Image (cartoon, rainbow, N blue to C red):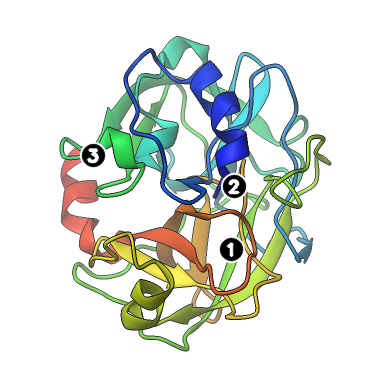
C-alpha cells in the first residue's frame, strides 16, 4: 500500500506510461525507489526461520522492489504492478534468507508474465504476475514452495491470516531494515471492506485484511508478497493496494489468489 506522497517514487521506476491520479491517497503497496532501500511491515514482529520458507525478495539492479512466493523451483508468483514493464535481465530473486540483501540463494529471471487483463492505471484488478527463473531454486532446509488454494476459494471474514515482507514500517518511512517482518491480520468481509472504500469497487478480485482501528498492515515494498492462512499457510492473496498504511478503517487489499489458480497453472 502506498500514500499519494509515495507515488513519485513509483513513477520513477515504472515504465513511461500514463497513470490515472489515485483518489484519496489510494495507491499500490508498491516497490520502492531504485535509489533507496526499502523498509518493513507496519505493526509487525521479526519473522523466524521457517515462518515463510517460500517468500522471496524481488530486486532490480541491487535494490529490493517487491515480495513474492515460490510456486515451484522455476516460478515466482507476485503482483502484476511489480511485474509490468520489467526487463527480466535486470531482475533477481533471493530465497531462503530472512534478509533481502544477503544470504540464501539468488538467481536471475528469464521471463515475466503479467495477467492479460491487468488494469495498469488502477493498480487493482487482475494484479498478478509470474516470474520464470533462469536457474532452479531447489527445495532445502530453508526453502519450500507455497501451497495454492483450490480454484474459486474465497476466504471468509474472520479467518486468521499472516502477511510478511520487507516493506516500510510506516507510510512516510524512508530507510528499511534488511530482516523480514510479519504481522497477523484477520480477513474482513468484502462488504466491510467496500464500506471502507466507497470510491472504489471491491470485487471478487480482492481479499481484504486488517483491523478497523488500523495499526497493523502491509506497506510500500511489501507488494506482491504473500498473505497466508495462519493455520495451513495456504496462499490467500498477494499484497496489492490500499489507502496509506495501517490507517483506521482502511484495510489492506490483496489479490484474491483463489480466483486465479487456473490462470496460474496455465501460465507457470
Q: Is residue 154 above or below residue 110?
A: below
- Label 2 vs 3, first from the N-terminus: 3
Give how far apart the Cα atoms at labels 3 and 1 are. Answer: 23 Å
215 horizontally vs 71: left or right? right
Which label was assigned to residue 222? 2
Residue 237: % across, % down:
41, 61
Q: Residue at x 67, y 18 (%)?
A: 62
Residue 246: % across, % down:
65, 64
Q: Residues within 10 Å of mark 1 (few under 14, many from 20)?
A: many
Q: Quadrant of the C terminus?
A: top left
Residue 71: % across, % down:
40, 48
Give how far apart the Cα atoms at labels 2 and 3 are. Answer: 19 Å
Occupied quadrant, residue 128: top left
Q: Residues within 10 Å of mark 3 (few under 14, many from 20)?
A: some
Residue under numbered circle 1: 163
187 horizontally vs 198: left or right? right
Q: Residues within 10 Å of mark 2 (few under 14, many from 20)?
A: many
Residue under numbered circle 3: 118
Amino acid at each position: 500500500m502506498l500514500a499519494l506522497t509515495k507515488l513519485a517514487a513509483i513513477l520513477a521506476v515504472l515504465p513511461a506510461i500514463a497513470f490515472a491520479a489515485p483518489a484519496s491517497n489510494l495507491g499500490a503497496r508498491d516497490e520502492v525507489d531504485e535509489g533507496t532501500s526499502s523498509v518493513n511491515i507496519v505493526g509487525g514482529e521479526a519473522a523466524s526461520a521457517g515462518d515463510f520458507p517460500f517468500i522471496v525478495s524481488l530486486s532490480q539492479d541491487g535494490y529490493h522492489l517487491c515480495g513474492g512466493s515460490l510456486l515451484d523451483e522455476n516460478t515466482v508468483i507476485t503482483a502484476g504492478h511489480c511485474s509490468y514493464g520489467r526487463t527480466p535481465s535486470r531482475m533477481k530473486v533471493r530465497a531462503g534468507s530472512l534478509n533481502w540483501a544477503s544470504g540464501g540463494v539468488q538467481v536471475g529471471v528469464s521471463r515475466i508474465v503479467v495477467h492479460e487483463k491487468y488494469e495498469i492505471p488502477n493498480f487493482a484488478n487482475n494484479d498478478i504476475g509470474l516470474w520464470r527463473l533462469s536457474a532452479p531454486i531447489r527445495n532445502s532446509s530453508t526453502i519450500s514452495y507455497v501451497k495454492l488454494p483450490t480454484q474459486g476459494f474465497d476466504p471468509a471474514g474472520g479467518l486468521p491470516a499472516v502477511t510478511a515482507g520487507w516493506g516500510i514500517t510506516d507510510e512516510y518511512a524512508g530507510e528499511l531494515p534488511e530482516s523480514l517482518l510479519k504481522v497477523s491480520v484477520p480477513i474482513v468481509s468484502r462488504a466491510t471492506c467496500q464500506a471502507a472504500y466507497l470510491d472504489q469497487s471491491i470485487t471478487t478480485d480482492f481479499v481484504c485484511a486488517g483491523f478497523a482501528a488500523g495499526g497493523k498492515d502491509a506497506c510500500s515494498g511489501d507488494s506482491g508478497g504473500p498473505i497466508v492462512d495462519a493455520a495451513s499457510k495456504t496462499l490467500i492473496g498477494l499484497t496489492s493496494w490500499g489507502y496509506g498504511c495501517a490507517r483506521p478503517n482502511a484495510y489492506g487489499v490483496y489479490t484474491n489468489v483463489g480466483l486465479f489458480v487456473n490462470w496460474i497453472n496455465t501460465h507457470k
